[in-house]
Image: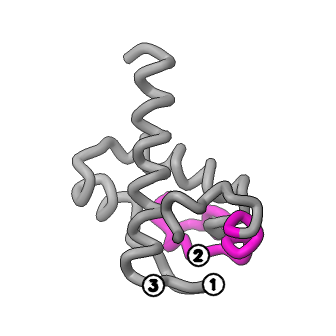
């Protein structure tokens, strides 16, 4: 897959996860579906979901606990930066 196509897939997954947060009314600390569940839900690879989580984590929208002995499928949760991005318009199209 080309870098542009991969970036597009990750951007699309970021939009899907943001939409899921909005649709389910999730708030800070609520657990998000696992990488595996999201991959099946949105017909994507787990790598795409993982990269989307990294993007959301960088913006503070998702919290991802450090890897432990249980493997990489650890529960992510909604982060506390969501209101900040709402004020600055970054998520305005997904979180009206």
Contact (Cβ within 8 Å) of mark 2 with mark 1 = yes
Q: Residue at x 44, y 61 (%)?
A: 17
As rendered, which of 91 and 35 lies closer to the eye? Answer: 91
Say left or right for 54 vs 13.
Answer: right
Q: Residues within 10 Å of mark 3 (few under 14, many from 20)?
A: few
Residue 63, how many percent across, how many down? 65, 69
Q: Is residue 47 above or below residue 63?
A: above
- Residue assigned mark 3: 25
Distance from the alpha carbon under mark 2 to that under mark 1:
5 Å
Residue 66, how many percent across, how many down? 67, 65
Q: Which residues are magenta?
A: 65-86
- Residue assigned mark 2: 78
Say left or right for 90 vs 87.
Answer: left
Q: Residues within 10 Å of mark 1 (few under 14, many from 20)?
A: some
Q: Which of the two discs, 2 and 3, labels the residue nearer the N terminus?
A: 3
As rendered, which of 57 and 90 lies closer to the eye? Answer: 90
Q: Which of the two discs, 2 and 1, labels the residue nearer the N terminus?
A: 1
80 within the magenta span: yes
Q: Is residue 1 above or below residue 13?
A: above
Contact (Cβ within 8 Å) of mark 2 with mark 3 = no
Say whether residue 47 is visible. no
Distance from the alpha carbon under mark 1 to that under mark 3:
10 Å
66 within the magenta span: yes
Of helix, strand and loop, which one carries label 2?
strand
């Amino acid at each position: 897959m080309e870098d542009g196509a991969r970036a597009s897939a990750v951007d699309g997954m970021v939009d899907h996860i943001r939409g899921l947060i909005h649709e389910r009314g999730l708030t800070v600390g609520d657990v998000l579906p696992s990488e595996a569940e999201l991959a099946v839900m949105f017909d994507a690879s787990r790598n795409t979901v993982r990269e989307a989580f990294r993007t959301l984590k960088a913006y503070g929208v998702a919290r991802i606990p450090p890897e432990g002995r249980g493997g990489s499928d650890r529960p992510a949760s909604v982060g506390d930066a969501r209101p900040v991005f709402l004020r600055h318009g970054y998520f305005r199209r997904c979180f009206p």
